[in-house]
Amino acid sequence: MGAWQSYSLRLQRRRWRIRAFRKRRDLRPIANRTDQIRPSDLLLFSTQRNEGIRLPWFLKYYRDMGVNHFFFVDNDSSDGSLDYLARQADVSVWTTRQSYKRSRFGVDWMNWLLMKYGHDHWCLTVDPDELFLYPFCDTRPLRALTDWLDASSIKSFSAMLLDMYPKGPLDQHPYTAGQNPLEVTSWFDAGNYTIRKNPKLGNLWIQGGPRARMFFADQPELAPALNKVPLVRWDRRYAYVSSTHNLLPRGLNQVYDEWGGEKASGALLHTKFLATFTEKAAEEVDRRQHYGASREYIAYAEGVKENPDLWCKWSEKYINWRQLEILGIMSKGNWA
Amino acid sequence: MSVGIIMLVHTAFNRAEDVARHWARGGCPVVIHVDNAVPRAHFEDLRQRLADFPDVLFSKRHRCEWGTWGLVAATQDAAELLLKSFKDVRHVYLASGACLPLRPVEELTSYLAERPRTDFIESATTADVPWTVGGLEHERFTLHFPFSWRNSRFLFDKFVELQRRVGYKRHIPKGITPHMGSQWWCLTRQTLSAILDDPERPRHDAYFKHVWIPDESYFQTLARLYSTQVESRSLTLSKFDFQGKPHIFYDDHLQLLRRSDCFVARKIWPHADRLYNAFLTDPNRVMSRQEPNPGKIDRIFAKAVDRRTRGRPGLYMQSRYPNEGWENGVTAGKYSVFQGFSELFVCFEQWLARATAAQVHGHLYAPKRAEFTSGQTLINGALSDNAALRDANPKAFLTNLVWNTRGERQCFQYGPYDNPKILSPMSRDPNAQISVISGAWAVPLFKSNSNFSDIRAEAARLQKIESRMLDILRSPEIKARIRIWSMAEFIENPMEPLQIIIDEIGQKSLRRLAEAPTLEDLTGFGQFLQNLKNQGMHPYLMGDFPVDPSPRNTRSGGRKPYLVKK
């Protein structure tokens, strides 16, 4: 990398940080319990809008994993989820009515909270429909992973987005609050992911899965990105660039080995395709607040009208992380 | 006679306290060294909490930065204190705060009592150790290292380089042969006191102060001078990964550690409650009284290192994306590509499936869709037959297919109509077996019912494409198993090459082919080529076909298959 490119990335990082700083004014604190945070705490950051039905399971899942404090930005919810979050003892929540799109799909808000509260903590940045998995997550708490990453001088941890879906049309499987969403969306595509390298930021660009197969077969280059780096030992100089797909400084995107070996990595089980999805897709098309002119949601809304079955005879049923490890979706690396 | 324990502690004090109590309850005196970097309050706290054990002492504190002399100085002081304060100690066991005894203390004491003269210390000459990290083996004894490896790596490296360049070498004191080994040892009072009371000790210390990572060489080298019986292994189970940092044990290693029969394991994760509970508070465990046997653990950690450094061949994923040439296998398994076969033979794919039990696809890179076996639109791993998805990344399509069907040989057809971008990656893949009958694309044209001018144009186009393909397959950097025949050459004697290809696929016993594939009827093909020539297009890839078919090809009922007998 030349000096010029290095400098321009530095400028870009500064721009995102200044932007995040300016967007702090969007956020109005509803419950700020950040004084409880101890230096070694594991933090989780999330943006949500009308995800009330998912939150009980989401909070339970990550509390069991060992997350100590949750940060939420509520984007103008109308389903009571803001009150619900404000009542939780380990949650700090801010609310905003500002445009999701103009905060670069929540990234500016996340960057600001990370900058202010995440410094020198391990921070997990996930959406309410994403369940994080890492090697040995059934027997070792998240702190075991972060301690190991610290000992190995690793600052960022990759977890690919794995789209989960039900068997049969989406609206056939009702979901109730507090239920494990994986009971409904328990299937996934095991081996149709394609990878390219982003030469500028050094991250891998992964596409594929049921969304590419069902909604983007004609324009594969527009299929959503699945690469994510959700777990980072945060420093206030860092900034997420595009969702949690990549961040700056670019060294943090080097979560893969280029000399034949495998680094340790996890997965984000993406439980987007619950029965609520049909409604959501229609609403998001009207709001036009999503990435790429909400292209994704337009494609979904069209696809969903026919109430599609994402399931096929080659779909895999989710069992545990070891299954994903064997399938080559995630890796233990040298953690044993 | 008892065993004295030295514990080097710098963090996780409550765990260190648990372990110290455990040793002391088992009748082993303990001397604890706490890193000088630890705040005084923590130190005093630990001292208070262990005050009820008279046999737990604290030695003079040193700053113990990794790889520096401080660790040796700390060990020396602690050992002196231990030997002076507890006269009946015969063996001294060096452990860290993250060490966990796996077997009852009595077992360790009786094991050592049975071997009163043996020093357990891993100690090998520098030429014989493969596990040093950073490439500094003998040089760690002959260079100076004033800069920290951890904190100022750049200066460290530069200074090493400088010394190498000017040819600087430190003098190794007389009588010393550098040895290295695990820093966790168990020495007899005789050997240890000989090292500590040696009149030469100031000279030794002065020398080792500037050796890199002296804690892995000071005692290891000097023990060789005084010991009557060195058993070169550590009683502490400690595994290192490819960066030279210790593997950590967690709760889920409980069974593994139980079965290892080692006396002490390191390094234990401080929050591994189940491990600490199981090994420190459960005195009624089955007495094993066996020789330590860490084989299973060795295998697991060796596998982990292999996973990290070599990975799984043919896998491309979020945390493994090898540069070209570093794949350790471009694809996950062997596969076969056939060009021109399905054009030349009737129902070649079905025949191949019968002959080999492999999974036989049609043209996977056909323009319209990937022709998966038996007309499927999706295949293993939910890989789609959609051409746009496939052509967005043709190589990933292939590597995915081969990865998804690991254990089942894949065969597919290829030809000048198909996406040409995949040929170059395939030709560089040692797993590919590519067999080409050049010019066979002319057979469907010959059979087709189009206007001759169209046929002529199409033939010219396909010939040009195939000729470019053959150039790729004949380039110097190919790694695939490639065989090319002209069509004329091939039909002279089709069974021999087929037999070779099938043998190489080698899934169905050693049986020779019982059934030959049927050739398309080529009566008049020579004339067809001549017509192309007459129209000014020169078909050359299929080899020489006589205009008048030779008499043996004109027998009625088609050509009889010709089987080679050995």
Image (cartoon, coloured by chain):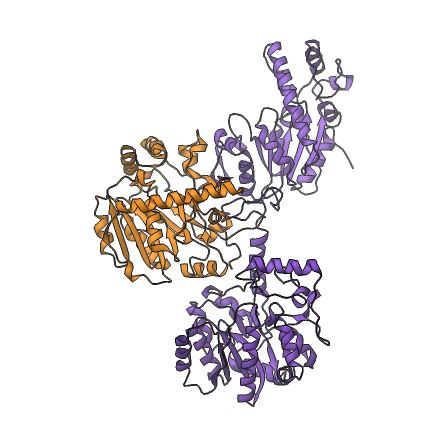
Chain colours: A orange, B purple
Q: Residue at x 69, y 39 (%)?
A: B504
A84 lies left or right of B260: left
Outermost bottom residue? B87
Instruction: Please indicate whether residue B23 sits to the left or right of residue B415 in the image.
Output: left
In the displayed structure, B303 sits above or below B449; it is below
Q: Is residue A243 visible?
A: no
- Residue B522, given in percent of the width and then of the height, sits at 69, 18
Quadrant into which the N terminus of chain B falls: bottom right
- In the visual, does B235 lie left or right of A27? right
- Indicate whether B532 appears above or below B432: above
Q: Residue furthest front?
A: B166
Horizontal arrangement in the rendering, residue B121 relative to residue B400 (left or right):
right
Q: Quadrant of residue B432?
A: top right
Corner quadrant of residue B165: bottom right
Displayed quadrant of residue B133: bottom right
- The foreground one among B424 and B200 is B200
Q: Estimate the x, y position of residue B461 in percent, counting from the top left.
A: 62, 18
Asked whether A151 or B90 is in front, the reply is A151
Q: Position of residue B450 (x, y in %)?
A: 58, 12
Give how far across and how far down residue B53 sits, in percent. 44, 85
Quadrant location, the C terminus of chain B = top right
- Using the rendered image of the protein, determine whether residue B109 is visible from the camera's viewpoint: yes
Q: Nearer the viewer, residue B363 or B21?
A: B21
